[in-house]
Image (spheres, rainbow, N blue to C red):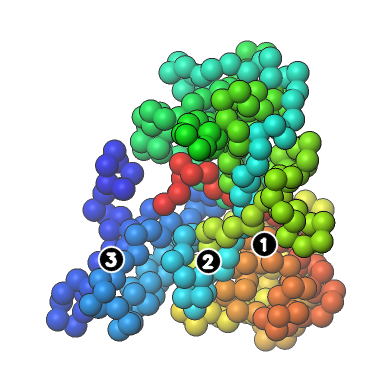
Amino acid sequence: YGGGGRMDWRELRLFDDDAGRPVAALSLLSRRMSLNGGELDAGLVASVAVPPEHRRRGYGRRMMQGLLEELHGQRTPVSLLFPFSTAWYRGLGYGVANYNWHLDLPIRLMPDFAERLAVRRATAEDGPAIRVCYEAARRIPDNNGWLARGDWEWQKRLWEKQDLEWLLFEADGEVEGYLVYTLTWGQSEAFTEVKEWVWTSSRAWQGLAGALGSLGDQARTVVYNTARHDPLLHALSEPYDWNRPPVAFVFFQAAKLVSGFMLRVVHLQEALSKRRYPAHVNADFWLEINDPQLAANCQPVYLAVREGNGNVAPASAIRNTQYAIRTNISTFSELYAGLLSAQQARTMGRLEGDDAACAALSAAFAAAPLHMWPADWF
């Protein structure tokens, strides 16, 4: 992470034992994450490490406890991380925030569109326009989980990668989308892997889809790790590979469901007030969240959702609002990310609330699936 300026010593956290010896470490990056057309400050936790000789002594958990207290003191709404163990981080209040489709299918199944005629190869001069396109796409309400990028991500993860190929869709003098991919040849394999596919218009998506399909002369298959609401799976001529046996009866594998990053609500009131909500939802909630790591989050709060905004205030012990919800912070983090519905959480015994409250909460926290491109992985 240190190369090229993504982080410096200020982002490093060390945990010492009682003798003052460093026994655990992590990195903390600050980025802004898109959600429902808005943005949230997020603390990205990376490189969590405890040497083998110091494990199973609670050092990692105590280090994470200190980090959460630090982020809460800074009023950081949420934290993100890629887990080595989902169960371990659930114990610290994180919840699964991201499931992706992983596609590995014959490229002959790709659709074709006349819009591919507006696709061309990108050059170094297109860099500024591509960055503008990415930022515009981040603000589209369906593109959740996308991170704001600095020069490091663009230079080290994208521009300087010699194996990356770039295509862009340009119309009316503007770049409306681009595609980043690799081509791999071998004696037994020839495939293209999509690394980033960004579009701000339907015609841009269609043009890039057609251009990707035209690579069939060079690649047999296309590999793509994408958001669950990506339209590609619905545009394939057949959503599966006939050469693979069915998994059951006549059910063929179209894609693999893979889990990705986790999210934790760190400062409850900031997370509720800074989040954008569906514009059509108007509801009042009494929320009681059990947070073993951060006692300040355990105080019941009142949330009023109006026209896409949330107003938060301390709640009295009397439920004088329309909908009352009780849950734990890990479950609430998954609700907050839009991954889990209140009804699902209640079925699993992880949430208390009547039918009306569950329906209202699910509607208020609805969001398109979160996704993150490889250039932003940490």
Instruction: Give left or right: position of 97 versus 114.
Output: left
Q: Is residue 51 left or right of residue 273?
A: left
Label 3 sits on what residue type?
Ala
> For residue 271, what is the image quadrant?
bottom right
Residue 35 seen in this snapshot: no
Between disc 2 and disc 1, the foreground one is: 1
Q: Residue placed at 34% from the left, 75% from the top?
A: 60
Which one is in front, 322 or 378?
A: 378
Disc ID at residue 59: none
Q: Of the residues under marks 1 and 3, which one precedes in the sequence?
A: 3
Residues tagged 3 and 2 counted as in contact (Cβ below 8 A)? no
Q: Earlier in the sequence, mark 3 or mark 2?
A: 3
- Secondary structure of the residue carrying numbered label 2: strand
Q: CA distance from mark 3 to mark 2?
A: 19 Å
Residue at horizontal 70%, vertical 45%?
243
Report whether 68 appears left or right of 331: left
Which mark identifies residue 339? 1
Q: Residue 324 falls in which quadrant of the image?
A: bottom right
In the image, residue 365 above or below residue 105: below
Residue 155 point in image, percent of width and height: 37, 32
Q: Type of residue at label 1?
A: Leu
Q: Residue at x 82, y 56 (%)?
A: 250
Which residue carries the number 3 mark?
25
Residue contact between numbered discs 2 and 1, judged by CB atoms under 8 Å: no
The foreground one among 306 and 245 is 245
Residue under label 2: 264
Q: Amino acid at mark 2?
A: Arg
